[in-house]
Amino acid sequence: MRKIDQIFLYGLIVIGLLTILYVLFADAIDGLEMGFFNPTTVLSFLLFICAAGFILMKLTNWSEIVIIAVSVVISVLLTFLLYFFVLLPLASAEVSTAYTNESLQGQVAKVIVPIPSNGYGEIIIETVNGLIAKRATGFDNEEINYDKQVLIIEVKDGTFLVKEYVPFIK
C-alpha cells in the first residue's frame, strides 16, 4: 500500500468518526455554523476527498497529483450538491410541528359537534400542520350550533372554552 493510499484511508476513518461525533453532539456545536462553512459541509468536503481519492487510487493508474486534483473537483461538486439540495432545504424547513393548547388561544375554530349549554362538543382548528380536533364548551355555558365559527378564549383542563365568533366589520 502506497503512502497516499494510507493517507486517504486514515482520512476516511478519522473524518468518519468526527462526523459521527458531530451528529451526536451537533446541538452543542451549533454556534460554529458560518454560512457555507459549517462543520457539516467541511466534514463532508474532506470525507468526499478521501473517499474519491482512495477509490481512484485503487481503480486507476493515474499519478497521485491527478488523483488529488480529480478528488478535489469531485468533492467540490458533491459538497455543492449536498449543501444546496439537502442542507439548505432542511435548514429552512419548519423546526417543529409541536403546539401547546395555550398557543391555540385567540384562534378561530369551527364547531364540528354541537356544543349544548352546560355540556361539551367538539371544535376543529386549522393550522399549518393540519387540522386539530379538541373538546370544547361554551365560555358562558351557552349553546353553539354545528358549523359555527368560534373564538378560543381559554383552555382549562384540556377543554377549550369558546365563544361564537362574530367578525369585526367596519
Image (cartoon, rainbow, N blue to C red):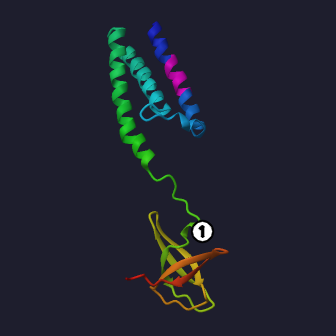
**Residue 151 horizontal/vertical position (percent):** 51, 79
Question: Which of the two residues, 115 or 152, is positioned nearer the viewer here?
Answer: 152
Residue sitting at the far front:
170
State the quadrant of the C terminus.
Answer: bottom left
Asked whether residue 15 is drawn in magenta, I would say: yes
Asked whether residue 120 is drawn in magenta, I would say: no
Amino acid tagged 1: Glu
Residue 23 seen in the current view: no
**Residue 73 horizontal/vertical position (percent):** 33, 22
**Residue 16 horizontal/vertical position (percent):** 52, 27
Residue occupying the point 60% across, 76% down: 154
* Mark 1 Cα shell of 10 Å, populated few (<14), some (14-19), many (≥20): some
Residue extent of the magenta highlight: 10-17
Residue occupying the point 42% across, 48% down: 92
User: On the image, numbered disc 1 is attached to which residue?
Assistant: 102
Residue 141 seen in the current view: yes
Above/below status of 155 relative to 37: below
**Which secondary structure lies at badge 1?**
helix
Residue occupying the point 47% across, 34% down: 34
